Amino acid sequence: MFKFKILSLACIIFIFEACGNNKTSTSQTSVTTEKPDSSSSSKTILFFGDSLTAGYGLDDPSQAYPSVVQNKIDSAKLPYKVVNAGVSGETSAGGKGRINWILKQHVDVFILELGANDGLRGIPVSETIKNLQDIVNAVKAKYPDAKLVMLGMQVPPNMGTAYAYSFKAIFPELAAKNKMTLMPFLLKDVGGVPSLNQKDGIHPTAGGAKIVGNNVWHVLQDVLTGKS
């Protein structure tokens, strides 16, 4: 089994406000970039996201959904290791600002999960699109052979029907433009379900994170096995 560590933090889409109020800074987080053994041919999957990816509030960082994906990879005996680059409160602009540093880690599969905090702040959709496209462009330029995956997000109706509709459309449109594999909504089957979220009603429990991880795996496994 490949060694890896997973960071901590997470936000749920249905109650964005708490995610925005989380003040954890990037200085309190780190990215695991452990190299495989020299005899190994393992490849790297980079999860680039916000607190939802990082796994906020879980008892053990290894309960975050990227860790669940790693367990699936190990069980399938596929030669990949997961690197969790989730940072609490990250916006698309913040991601754009740190992407070049993150790409010092070799990437074979790049998984993008950003935008929730843009929605919280009511940032114009056009700005979010530009920032996410710039992130994707940076990955393509540095690792042109990397496979790309987009994890879609949504905002609640109280952000305004027009804004919510336009925001939701960001992810399938960018995925199609850049030939990325798309998971339409990361929190499918978990968002808004009390039993799958922590006591604050915001952050997924270990059980919720496991469901998220399983859903991501269903999308990712075809990418890793060459079926997508």
Image (cartoon, rainbow, N blue to C red):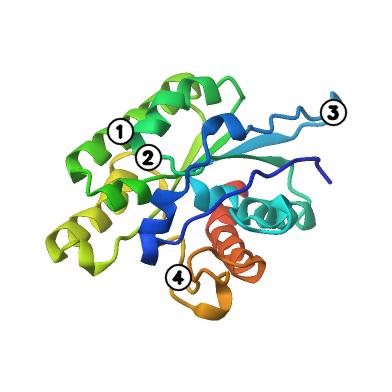
* Residue at 32% across, 60% down: 154
Asked whether the beta carbons under mark 1 and mark 2 sit within 8 Å of each other, the answer is yes
Q: SS class of the residue under badge 4?
A: loop
Q: Quadrant of residue 71?
A: bottom right
Instruction: Give how far across and how far down residue 34 sits, in percent.
Output: 75, 30
- Spatial separation of the CA atoms under disc 3 and disc 1: 35 Å
Q: SS class of the residue under badge 3?
A: loop
Q: Quadrant of residue 130?
A: top left
Q: Residues within 10 Å of mark 3 (few under 14, many from 20)?
A: few
Checking the image for residue 191, the label placed there is 4
Q: Earlier in the sequence, mark 3 or mark 4?
A: 3
Q: SS class of the residue under badge 1?
A: helix
Checking the image for residue 64, the label placed there is none
Q: Earlier in the sequence, mark 1 or mark 2?
A: 2
Out of 212 and 58, give the one closest to the viewer. 58
Residue receiving disc 1: 131
Please, what is the three-letter code of the amino acid marked with disc 4? Gly
Q: SS class of the residue under badge 2?
A: loop
Mark 3 or 4, which is nearer the eye?
4
Residue receiving disc 3: 37
Asked whether the beta carbons under mark 2 and mark 3 sit within 8 Å of each other, the answer is no
Residue receiving disc 2: 91
Please, what is the three-letter code of the amino acid marked with disc 1? Asn
Residue farthest to the left, as pictured: 162
- Spatial separation of the CA atoms under disc 3 and disc 4: 38 Å
